[in-house]
Image (spheres, rainbow, N blue to C red):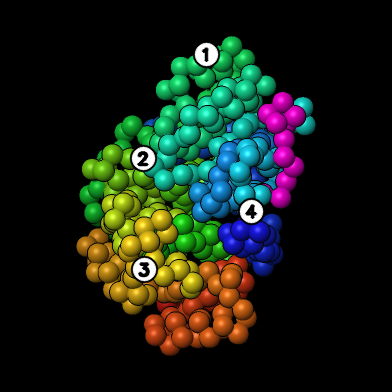
Amino acid sequence: MPTIWRRCKRSFARETTPENHLPVDVPGASAPVGASMNLRSGPRRIRSPYLVMLGDTSDPTYAKTGLGIRQWQPERVIGQLRFNGCNVDLGVADLTPAQARDQGACSLVVGVAPAGGGMPEHWWNCLEDAARAGLDIVAGLHVRLAKRQSLVRIAEQHGVKLIDVREPPTDLPVADGRKRRGLRLLTVGTDCAIGKKYTALGIHGAMRQAGMKATFRATGQTGILIAGEGMPIDAVVADFASGAAEALSPDNDPDHWDVIEGQGSLFHPAYAGVSLALLHGSQPDAIVIAHDATRTHLSGWEHLPLPSIMDCIDRHLEAGRLTNPAIRCVGISVNTSTMQSDHRAACLDELTRQTGLVCFDPLIDGCAGVVDHLQDAFG
């Protein structure tokens, strides 16, 4: 069983009570998708349940969309569509588009996010088959469904929708850097695909369970599909990316927390730009660093070593002070899923000794500790 899915299988029971779970539409209803926070662009609607397409993906790192939806909105997933060579398993039935439609599926969701956001040529035929079967097609890749004329024609013939989640609003401002009311926490990371979204969702749930005012702010395709709204930050033109982060997290009550899903890594040669834009535009009062205790090099860029935790803290605080001089790091979220319990405890103890911060695995330890610290530090 892939490591990432082992993590997804573990229970979030302490943080997914009815009081703090993200809103869920009943099967057959529509989930709002889009950037609706004080922007003129209206939300798009996605009909559930979903058939999640994994294709022939062999690396679970690239299947984080499907895995994330299955973890956080399991009632929306009716089946999975896998090709030969796919090693990722969501733990649901393998169905063809026609079978899924017969069982009540309303949409096919592309559940992978490969490097570059493209789609293999042979996947397009499958999407066309799904449209013929009567399923809406939902994707969060950089390649747009509407650019595929054959798919557009089939969708029109069969009365189904093509929904590109990674389509940002067209009226975004440039950032002005002015301090906004309310409190903000941003998850950042030593690498990509390392737990920023799961950490943000866990912290948001723990805040709600503690009776705090909190909103999860999604910035990537998976988070948007889970939350029902958000900002596809890596699809925004570079000059407007910080402004998009500001628009995502507008003025709020002084005691309200926006928990903002981080993207990329400041230490990644390909994706540092989006990380910096989020850091500046979010103006976080607090950051939590996501880290994998067993990863030594950037995933997929094995010639580059992972930064040290202390270097990661220092670099983020230095960059973040441009728009929030009071920024502070409040915790380290660590993926310890492949470690034995004694090694896991020793790892977290050592990180706590090094940093003086709350160090935790959000799926094993929960996020109550870091939330308690936030309440003490910010009132």
Judging from the image, what secondary structure is the residue with disc 1 in?
helix
What residue is rendered at 74% in x and 42% in y? 93
| Residue 41 percent coordinates (x, y) | 41, 32
Looking at the rendered image, the disc whose residue lies closer to the viewer, 2 or 3, is 3
Frontmost residue, 350 versus 23: 350
Residue stretch rendered in magenta on the structure: 90-100
Judging from the image, what secondary structure is the residue with disc 2 in?
helix
Looking at the rendered image, the disc whose residue lies closer to the viewer, 3 or 4, is 3
Q: Residues within 10 Å of mark 2 (few under 14, many from 20)?
A: some
Q: Name the residue type under label 3.
A: Leu
Q: Which mark is residue 235?
A: 2
Q: Name the residue type under label 1.
A: Arg
Looking at the rendered image, the disc whose residue lies closer to the viewer, 1 or 3, is 3
Distance from the alpha carbon under mark 2 to that under mark 3: 26 Å
Distance from the alpha carbon under mark 4 to that under mark 1: 34 Å
| Residue 268 percent coordinates (x, y) | 32, 58
In the rendered image, which residue does mark 1 sit on? 153
| Residue 157 percent coordinates (x, y) | 59, 11
Q: Is residue 3 visible?
A: yes
Sequence-first tag of 4 and 1: 4
In the rendered image, which residue does mark 3 sit on? 306
In the rendered image, which residue does mark 4 sit on? 71
